[in-house]
Amino acid sequence: MAELEPRSSRGRRAHLVVTLVCTLGCMLSLLSGCAGSQQGAGTPARASVTGNAPTDLSGAAVGATGTFNSTDIAWLQLLIAMDDQTRHILELAPRHVGEPALKRWAADVARDNLGQLKALRKLLATAGIPDTNPHEGHDMPGMVDAGELEALADATGPEFDRLLRSALREHLTQAEHLSNGVRDSGSDTRVRKLAAAVKNSAADQRRSMPT
């Protein structure tokens, strides 16, 4: 049965992301650092700014439009990527989970996750940004990677419950931290309102997780 890799290095990166996300420049660092994970070792990641719109490593605009600033767009794209990956493991829960209380909790989280994804994608469309995933294949804090998904798919009962708790605890913690950063650096009132709701929901779900 597949086992998850130790999370110590990812935990250190999670602390870095929390520190950086509070400003627009730091959000750009998050995006460029994510893209940099796909480069060869020793190749520095770079992010540039043209007007109000940051560009990725290929020079394509990923930034602001209308009342949405670059932090708003970056948050929407990252939360969509995180929630979409989490959706896959929550779909496994009804068949794999062992504890009844955890199964009920996961069902509630799955329902909220789908509603949250819908709201995030609606705002991204309002901003005029294509619903593509710039974080595809990236190993980031709060993101369920292929190895974790495979381990969860192979597990049942207590082992699945352990892996599910670990993955969702990290996801909810990171969603809360990232959403908190939008309060200081976001521009669009709708994004700020949704970020506040995501933060509160993630905190409530994390605290109510059956142990």
Image: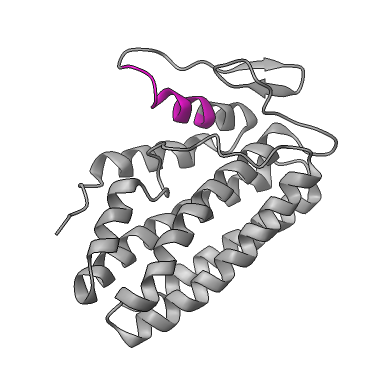
From the viewer's perspective, tell me whether residue 183 is left or right of residue 104: right
Q: Which residue is outermost to the left?
A: 1
Q: Is residue 66 left or right of residue 91?
A: right
Question: Vertical placement of 110 versus 177: above or below?
Answer: below
Residue 37 is a magenta residue: yes
Looking at the image, which residue is at 32% across and 65% down? 164
Q: Is residue 41 above or below residue 17?
A: above
Give the left or right position of residue 25, taking residue 35 as reference.
Answer: right
Outermost residue toward the top?
43
Magenta segment: 30-40
Which quarter shows the N terminus?
Answer: bottom left
Q: Nearer the viewer, residue 127 or 29?
A: 127
Classified by dominant secondary structure, the portion drawn in magenta counts as helix
Q: Position of residue 147 (x, y in %)?
A: 28, 48
Q: Residue 58 or 206: which is nearer the viewer?
A: 58
Q: Position of residue 177 (x, y in %)?
A: 51, 50
Percent of width and height locating residue 178: 54, 47
**Residue at the spot 43% in from the left edge and 68% down from the top edge:** 91
The C terminus lies in quadrant: bottom left
Query: How many labels, in total?
Result: 0
**Which residue is pictured at 67% across the width and 28% down the height?**
62
Across and down, in percent, residue 195 comes to 65, 54
State the residue in front, 175 or 22: 175
Q: Is residue 34 left or right of residue 158?
A: right
Of 86 and 50, nearer the camera is 86
